[in-house]
Image: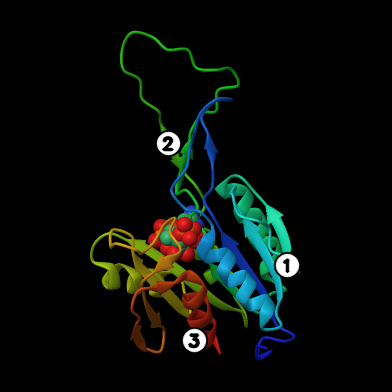
């Protein structure tokens, strides 16, 4: 029996990795499982929000009672996020979109040759930055996945991308970040508030993140 403190709110959440194709056989991606974003979607739904979940490919069951939009690439995630952003109250970007994609997609399978090979990458759009530029009354919550200088980098991302709050996780710490059921985070807000939390389940962290948005 949860409090319905997000009743009437439109909440847009992104989750999971993106997948950038090199040829019909290969792609680059990252270790995101989608668990953090799906936990947030379920928690927001249970607290009465209208939830839209934009998700990269994951092995997770699609949450019921949530509008789920499947995407593969960062460009597709960008398009869908921008499409829903204007009518949302809260955007939470737990996804791990690839910052780069192969410059050229080969329609045919790339054949191996004797020597080494290299792939040229080009920049993908920065979804959060764009949302920060066009935001009106929306609240934007970003994530920062770091391996060093975590708070400094997270704070920089919050300021540069015009965010209201950022959830920083050190992905090289045991039990934190990608894949597992737990995470450990520091929440920074643009009013200067800083809160540090112990290791806990992603479900519990999702609750705490929503408590911090109100
Ligand atoms: O999915 P799980 O296995 O449960 O793992 C959870 C998680 C580690 C993926 C999650 O907790 C997390 O940290 N998500 C953000 C991962 C990431 O891309 O971090 P970043 O520091 O590279 O990006 C900063 C922010 O910009 C993120 O909110 C990201 O969604 C966003 N971004 C990044 C790249 C891009 N092109 N556009 C973006 O909007």
The residue tagged with tag 1: helix, strand or loop? loop
Disc 3 residue lies near ligand 1 with CB under 8 A: no
- In this picture, is 77 found above or below 27? below
Q: Secondary structure at mark 2?
A: strand
Asked whether 127 or 94 is in front, the reply is 94
Q: State the image coordinates of residue 192 (x, y, percent, origin top left).
A: 35, 88
Q: Name the N-terminal-most of marks 2 and 3.
A: 2
**Image coords of residue 45 (percent x, y):** 68, 76
Q: Residue furthest top?
A: 114
Counting residues from the N terminus, which is met first, the one under dot 3 or under dot 1?
1
Q: Nearer the viewer, mark 3 or mark 1?
A: 1
User: Mark 3 highlights which residue?
Assistant: 212
The tag earlier along the polypeptide, 2 or 1, is 1
Residue that appears at 39% across and 79% down: 187
Looking at the rendering, which quadrant does residue 15 occupy? bottom right
Looking at the rendered image, the disc whose residue lies closer to the viewer, 2 or 3, is 3
Q: Residues within 10 Å of mark 1 (few under 14, many from 20)?
A: some
Numbered mark located on residue 137 in the image: none
Q: Is residue 163 visible?
A: no
User: From the image, which quarter does the N terminus lie in?
Assistant: bottom right
In the depicted structure, whether residue 203 falls above or below residue 2: above
The answer to whether residue 36 of the structure is visible from this angle is: yes
Residue placed under numbered mark 1 in the picture: 66
Read off the residue under disc 2. Answer: 121
For residue 66, what is the image quadrant? bottom right
Q: Report the Cα–Cα distance between label 2 and label 1.
A: 34 Å
């Amino acid at each position: 029996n949860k409090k319905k403190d997000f009743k009437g709110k439109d909440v847009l959440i992104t989750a999971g990795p993106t997948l950038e194709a090199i040829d019909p056989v290969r792609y680059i991606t990252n270790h995101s499982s989608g668990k953090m974003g799906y936990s947030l979607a379920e928690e927001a739904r249970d607290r009465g929000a209208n939830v839209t979940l934009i998700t990269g490919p994951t092995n997770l069951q699609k949450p019921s009672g949530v509008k789920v939009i499947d995407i593969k690439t960062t460009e597709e995630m960008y398009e869908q996020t921008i499409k829903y952003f204007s009518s949302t109250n809260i955007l939470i970007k737990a996804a791990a979109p690839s910052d780069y994609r192969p410059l050229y997609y080969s329609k045919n399978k790339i054949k191996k040759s004797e020597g080494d090979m290299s792939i040229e990458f080009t920049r993908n759009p920065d979804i959060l930055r764009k949302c920060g530029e066009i935001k009106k009354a929306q609240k934007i919550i970003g994530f920062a996945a770091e391996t060093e200088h975590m708070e400094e980098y997270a704070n920089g991302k919050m300021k540069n991308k015009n965010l209201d709050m950022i959830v920083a996780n050190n992905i090289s710490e045991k039990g934190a970040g990608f894949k597992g059921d737990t995470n450990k985070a520091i929440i920074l807000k643009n009013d200067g508030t800083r809160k540090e939390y112990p290791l806990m389940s992603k479900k519990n962290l999702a609750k705490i993140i929503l408590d911090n948005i109100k």
